Image: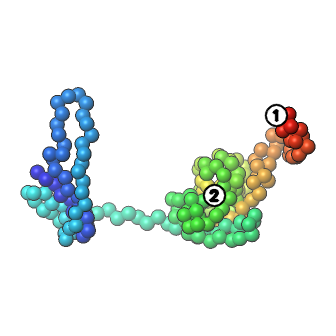
Amino acid sequence: MDLQILCNSTLSLSFSPSLFPSHSHRHRCMPNLGLRAMPSPHRNMISTNATTMATDAVPQPSPSPVPTHQVTVHDRQRGVVHQFLVPEDQYILHTAESQNISLPFACRHGCCTSCAVRVKSGQIRQPEALGISAELKSKGYALLCVGFPSSDLEVETQDEDEVYWLQFGRYFARGPIERDDYALELALADE
């Protein structure tokens, strides 16, 4: 029996059981399904050589739309404000990039503070934000690379070093480490 699945007015898929050879040996080869696109005047029909049935009678589940939220990012470093729509199930940074909006980032995994922002209004969900402590999250800090909007959202980018200091500064005994160009020059000269 040949099976033909007519998906819509422009595409149908068909294959033949002869494309699925039986093998008597222990290891089976992956069959070549032989799927081919064919123009079809029929719509929502499943047909075989023996029968044709309309799928309009079978209720099809309709995908529920994902809520979308307005996200406003005040980029302090560049002096610009970006506004764009982000679905609730998409990362803010990824969606911004897909709309050709350039925002600060580095790791894309929620482990650094390059894309850190402070929430001015709205809610963000960030279960994978390892670069921000629970304490900083409670103070309104978030990471765009692993953040999902839960409502309309307004955020402001932060200086990466300041956020890093807030996150880890208490672990340094004498305060922030100052850059010493002279010591760097000496170290490089030894190599």
Q: Can you identify the residue that label 2 sits on?
A: 144
- Residue type (three-letter) at the residue carrying disc 1: Glu
Query: Residue drawn at (74%, 59%), measured in percent from left and top?
Result: 158
Amino acid marked by disc 2:
Leu
Residue 59 falls left or right of residue 22: right
Secondary structure category for the residue under label 1: loop
- Residue 61 vertical position relative to residue 17 in the rendered view, above or below: below
Categorize mark 1 by other alpha carbons within 10 Å: few (<14), some (14-19), many (20+). Answer: few
Is residue 34 or residue 79 the one in the foreground?
Answer: 34
Task: Tell me which residue sits at (70%, 68%) in the image.
Answer: 74
Residue at left 64%, top 64%?
102
Q: On screen, 182 above or below 40?
A: above
Between disc 1 and disc 2, the foreground one is 1
Residue 105: x percent and y percent? 66, 55
Residue at the image point whose x is 16% and y is 37% from the top: 22
Residue that protrudes farthest toward the left in the picture: 50
What is the quadrant of residue 86 in the picture?
A: bottom right
On the question of residue 24 being in view, the answer is yes
Which element is circle 2 on?
helix
Badge 1 is on which residue? 191
Q: Position of residue 123 (x, y in %)?
A: 62, 62
Q: Earlier in the sequence, mark 1 or mark 2?
A: 2
Q: Nearer the viewer, residue 36 or 99?
A: 36
Colouring convention used in this rendered image of the protein: rainbow
Residue 70, position as x, y percentages in the image: 58, 70
Q: Are marks 1 and 2 in contact (CB under 8 Å)?
A: no
Query: Percent from the top left, x then y, of residue 180?
Result: 89, 44
